[in-house]
Image: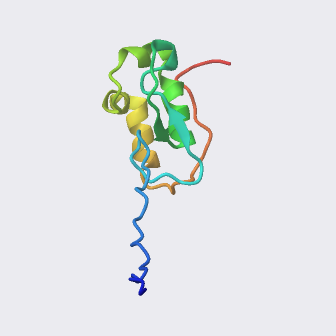
Amino acid sequence: MARNRETYEEPEETAAPELTCWLCERAMGAAIEWHHPIPKSRGGRAKVPVHPICHQTIHQHFTTSELGRLPPEPAPIRERDAVARFLEWVANKPADFHAPTKGEGKRR
């Protein structure tokens, strides 16, 4: 009985979709943090990838209450003056760039 032998071909490698930061839209590096556009305390379950420096910036300039009142999109966050200046500054930095962030007059 003859067997019908099919030749095995390696499947074409499909590149995994490259993650981009929800806030700054740069490619993600090795460090990925996950941000809830709708805070968990407000029932949010969805998470989006952000750079650690972008995540810190979001939480330095917005309280949980403020984030809960915003639509779950990055545009309203990007429109705040301090965040817009940050996005201009970070635009050409490498994916794994990190630096301390300053708050808007918040004290420790």
Viewer-side residue, 68 vs 87? 68
Q: Quadrant location of residue 81?
A: top left
Q: In this image, 100 relative to 69: left or right?
A: right
In the rendered view, tell whether residue 106 sits above or below residue 19: above
**Left or right for 74, reference 19:** left
Q: Residue 41: x and y, percent?
A: 51, 14
Which residue is at 61% across, 44% downward?
99
What is the x, y in percent for residue 31?
59, 48
Which of 49/75 is in front?
A: 49
Q: How many marks?
A: 0
Kindly give the residue lying farthest to the bottom in the view shown. Answer: 2
**In the picture shown, does residue 90 fall above or below 5?**
above
- Give the answer, above or below, for where 96 lies relative to 55: below
x, y percent for residue 5: 41, 83
- Tell me where residue 98 appears, x and y as whole percent: 59, 47
Q: Is residue 75 above or below residue 107?
A: below
Q: Residue furthest front?
A: 1
> How is this picture coloured?
rainbow
Residue shown at 32% from the left, 22% from the top: 71
Where is the C terminus found, in terms of image quarters? top right
Residue appearing at x 43%, y 19% in the figure? 67
Q: Quadrant of residue 107?
A: top right
Q: Quadrant of the N terminus?
A: bottom left
